[in-house]
Amino acid sequence: MTASETGLSSGVTTALGTAPSPGAVPAPAPSPASRALRLVVLGRQGSGKGTQAVRLAECYGVPHISTGDAFRSAVRSGSELGAKAKVFMETGELVPDDLTVGIVEEYLAGAGQHGFILDGFPRNVRQAEALARMLAPARLDVVVNLEVSTEEVLRRLAGRRVCTNCGANYNVVDNPPSVPGRCDVCGGAVAQRADDTEEAIRQRLEIYESATAPLVDWYKEEGLLATVDATGDPDLVTERVVAAIDAATGSL
Ligand code: AMP
């Protein structure tokens, strides 16, 4: 799939690039690695995956790809891909694998060829197998699994607000924008995601349990899994994640 087919007209790097994170503190310095990191972040909706992925991208100097951001950008651009994806996203369903794998393949052949932080992909075993094929003979360095209780993810998702322009994340309860409804980073409109309705959240969490959670065991068997407690202050979570990555990739 090409950039024009995906509708990501400004190029994969820009459209899939790292969204700014308001109020992010400088991330802890990782141990120097002799080559770029290839990392997947797993975690339920509301686990803080997006926030941590943005910080890790900065910290390790590798690009961040969020398939969810890519689809939202395609929907905004009015592309054919966006029109196809929208139907699934609105109800909390997964977008079909052929569309999703195509986007990631294009990215890994371009901006992600020297390392990456993947956020929101893979979402099922078929996608994980496709990713392994794309990377071969290389493989992932580590898969970070962010663990949060169901109660906490429901609380976070109900209050989540996102900048419709740059993708920066807020929470009405514990991280609101300084001016209500306006993004601190770019001044764009801050709104609830269309798929953060109660029904769509329930559907996405169910799909996570049935389709995505099996990846935890899958990557454990591959010896790639690092599980991290993702409750509490996001800065502390970042410290835990960096420590887990450094422990897992000590031999890089
Ligand atoms: P996210 O921002 O990661 O929660 O993704 C938002 C929506 O985009 C999901 O509910 C899916 O409809 C779609 N999506 C994102 N990533 C994938 C993926 N890897 N496979 C299928 N659908 C995806």
Image (spheres, grey):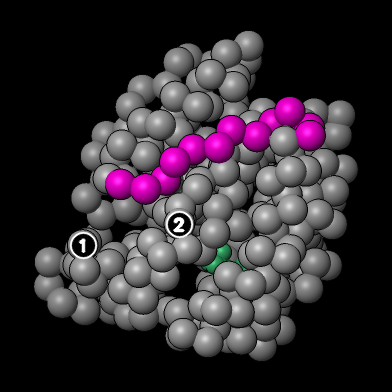
Task: Identify the mark nearer the N-term, 1 or 2.
Answer: 2
x and y, in percent, of residue 3 in the image: 69, 64
Residue type (three-letter) at the residue carrying disc 1: Asp
Magenta segment includes 228:
yes
Residue 149 tag number: 2
Where is the C terminus found, in terms of image quarters?
A: top right
Q: CA distance from mark 1 to mark 2?
A: 18 Å
| Residue located 23% across and 72% down the image | 172
Q: Is residue 107 visible?
A: yes
Asked which secondary structure carries label 2, the reply is: loop
Q: Quadrant of residue 55?
A: top left
**Left or right of residue 195, residue 106 in this image:** right
x and y, in percent, of residue 177 in the image: 19, 67
| Residue located 51% across and 78% down the image | 201
236 or 162: nearer the viewer: 236
Query: What's the magenta region?
Result: 221-232
Q: Quadrant of residue 217?
A: top right
232 or 142: nearer the viewer: 232
* Residue behind label 2 places its C-beta within 8 angstroms of ligand 1: no
| Residue located 60% across and 57% down the image | 120
**Left or right of residue 179, residue 144 in this image:** right
Where is the N terminus found, in terms of image quarters?
A: bottom right
Relative to 190, does residue 166 appear above or below in the rendering? above
Q: Is residue 58 visible?
A: no
Asked which secondary structure carries label 1, the reply is: loop
Q: Name the mark nearer the viewer: 1 or 2.
A: 2
Answer few, some or many: residues within 10 Å of disc 2's Cα (few below 14, many 20 plus, some between 14 and 19): few
50 or 212: nearer the viewer: 212
The residue singled out by tag 1 in the image is 174
